[in-house]
Image: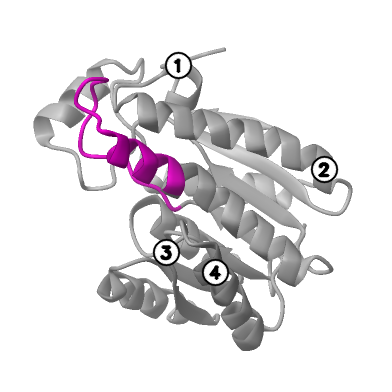
Amino acid sequence: MELKGKNALVTGGSRGIGRAISLALADKGVNVAVHYHQNAEAADLTTKKIIEKGVRAEKVQADVKDSDQVLSMMKTVKKSMGSLQILVNNAGLSGANSSLLSIKEAEWREVLDVNLTGVFNCSRAAVLEFRKDLKKMVNISSIAGKMGGTIGCHYAASKAGVIGMTFALARELAPDIWVNAVAPGPVDTGFLSPNKEKKLSQATPFGRIASPEEIAHTVLYLLENDYVSGEVVDVNAGRYMD
């Protein structure tokens, strides 16, 4: 698909991987709606950077766990941008705890609700509002969804669920909408301690973790290629191969 002139919504698009995806889309001439939950300042910075690239940018707020808020967000995007061809489901969180016995039920539900139900809510609302326009959907999963990872069983379960949902939607929505996923390994989003980054780098054959821009590059490939759907692209430099 030719990206120039298209409209995209990136959930969690204000920082980290989401910001890199938003800016990469803007570099391709895509108008971007930048979703955020709480950090309006980060969303403002990202939209400013997008506008500087000569395309339109909109800041939209919603709690992806809440289907009513998500549907309202989609209506806002429709009113401001008119149409939507691209949805990138990137919003997610890891949770505060990682061991089975330390994860309370409330934390389990929070992580599953944001990472998995959030993708469901956004995908469903986008199809409801933009079925005639929507063409490409990319979901951000994780290496943890394939091999467990180290963040916790709640995170791994949510990201494995995103992979399963990607497969299901790719079949259901074909041939009108292409649905794919990206499963990154560890990414330098600025939130890792130096010690944690060192350990993760040492566990990777290339000796380093990914940059957000490397994940964004993979998203662009999935958006531009019209014969790839129902795929999960691993971006982990050989740390995990299935």
Quickly name the residue at label 3.
63
Q: Which residues are magenta?
A: 91-113
Kind of residue at badge 4: Asp
Kind of residue at badge 3: Asp
Q: Looking at the image, do the residues carrying marks 3 and 4 touch, with CB atoms under 8 Å apart?
A: no
Quickly name the residue at label 4.
68
Q: Looking at the image, do the residues carrying marks 4 and 2 touch, with CB atoms under 8 Å apart?
A: no
The structure residue drawn at horizontal position 76% and vertical position 40%, both measured from the top left corner, is 170
Query: Quick one: label 2 or label 3, which is nearer the N terminus?
Result: 3
Quickly name the residue at label 2.
172
The structure residue drawn at horizontal position 55% and vertical position 62%, both measured from the top left corner, is 67
The Cα atoms of the two marked residues, 2 and 3, are separated by 26 Å
Residue 82 counted in the magenta span: no
The Cα atoms of the two marked residues, 1 and 2, are separated by 26 Å
Query: Quick one: label 1 or label 2, which is nearer the N terminus?
Result: 1
Quickly name the residue at label 1.
147
Colour style of the rendered protein structure: one colour
Query: Quick one: label 1 or label 3, which is nearer the N terminus?
Result: 3
Kindly indicate the quadrant of the structure image that contains residue 111: top left
Q: Nearer the viewer, residue 74 or 187?
A: 74
Kindly indicate the quadrant of the structure image that contains residue 6: bottom right
